[in-house]
Image: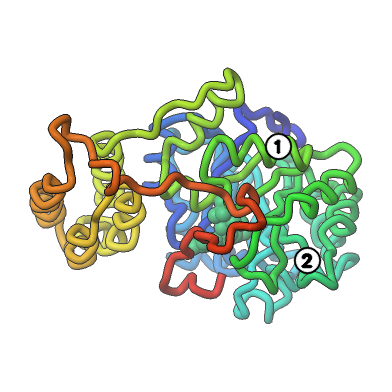
Amino acid sequence: MRLGPLTLQSNLFLSPLAGYTNLPFRLAVREVGGLDLATTDLVNARSLLENNPKALKLIQTCPADRPLAVQLFGSVPEEMRDAALRLESIGIASVDINMGCPVRKVCRVGGGSAMMMELDRTAQLVKTMVDALKIPVTAKMRLGWDDDNITAPDLARALEDAGASAIFVHGRTREQGFGGAVNLAGIRAVVGAVKNIPVIGNGDVTTPEAARQMFDQTGCAGVSIGRGAFYNPWIFLHTRHYLETGELLPEPGFDQRVRVMCRHLDLMIEIFGEELGCRMFRKVAPWYAKRFGPANEFNKRVVLVCSRAEFHEVLQNYRRWRAQFLDSNGELKPRFQPQPMVASFMQEPAVAHRDHIPVPKGPVEVW
Ligand SMILES: Cc1cc2nc3c(=O)[nH]c(=O)nc-3n(C[C@H](O)[C@H](O)[C@H](O)COP(=O)(O)O)c2cc1C
């Protein structure tokens, strides 16, 4: 898989998830395997140029976290170019431009999904960046503003002409938010619109089969996975295995999940310090717990932890409580096992009830 001059070992990507895809999470997923290019949370180009400490923290990386793309947002071409040049100078492999963020704060200043409505201006911005950089410039967009304004195919073509190296497309409109099913035909239209550059499909991929279906039905060159990696940090490894061999590996068991969760917490503490790392982990741990079976006892307590010792105490108490749901082999009794994950675009239209992937709460509610 190539993004312009950059050769990658995998066509599976980690999507940017503001508030989550920080260095500890990326390292935890990379250690599990199957991932090559990961992307940071979105970073305000101007804040980066102003050395804002929060922006600098967002681009924090280390040799084990390579190759890394940084996602920038902003609408002033010179600022975007200068921020990207700075990223290039510190060894960042690729720069992605956020064109899909529906958050008002981002759209108000002409960034995020507002860019999808202004093709010429956006193409000019990309050209300004491409002309100055050696590393690839990519763009991440939604299908369009709403169903009446599906701009992604035209925008993708215009950005290819401006020199973009790849297009990442979440198969929903801005108006859709995270509701409804991902529109694979919409992604296919973007694939059909570009001449040479790869299009990477995105949205609701939580299983290897869903990734396979996205490849098959859209013709995309790669698949990018966001929330699916929360549930299942093995998704990259298992999807690669499935794509290469057709064999579905079993879902990791409770002990394996707990091992990765604890490693993730250790990395959070290493990188953010014990107090902040534990506080930040309060919203992360319940994502692991979604595949633990009954977990309310864990979720209730983990949102209060302030230290590693407290976390391990919560975990130990939870193990004892969880024992009531296990059979004599130590496996969850069938009625307590979590439901299999099914992507929105793989469900039968006749199914009345769709289980949407939850969208995390907090400042990211508006995504
Ligand atoms: C909590 C959260 C934060 C997100 N942050 C970003 C972001 O910083 N930049 C971006 O382009 N997309 C962002 N997205 C969108 C995701 O990258 C992705 O397009 C979307 O979640 C659909 O993919 P998924 O179903 O695999 O999660 C965010 C989504 C969520 C749920």
Q: Which residue is at 37% across, 47% downward?
A: 24
Disc 1: residue Cβ within 8 A of ligand 1's nearest atom: no
Crowding around mark 1 (Cα neighbors within 10 Å: few <14, some 14 to 19, many 20+) is some
Q: Which residue is at 52% across, 45% downward?
A: 206
The secondary element bearing badge 1 is classed as helix
Residue 39 in view in this figure = no
Nearest the viewer among 44 and 288 is: 288
Q: Is residue 273 above or below residue 241?
A: below
Q: Which residue is at 26% across, 39% downward?
A: 254
* Residue to which mark 2 is pinned: 144
The residue under label 1 is which amino acid type? Answer: Phe
Q: Is residue 310 above or below residue 118?
A: above
In the image, ligand 1 is in what quadrant? bottom right
Q: Position of residue 75 (x, y in %)?
A: 73, 70
Q: Position of residue 332 (x, y in %)?
A: 23, 41
Q: Quadrant of the N terminus?
A: top right
Labels 2 & 1 near each other (Cβ < 8 A): no
Of tags 2 and 1, which is closer to the observer? Answer: 1
* Residue to which mark 1 is pinned: 215
The residue under label 2 is which amino acid type? Answer: Gly
Colour treatment of the image: rainbow
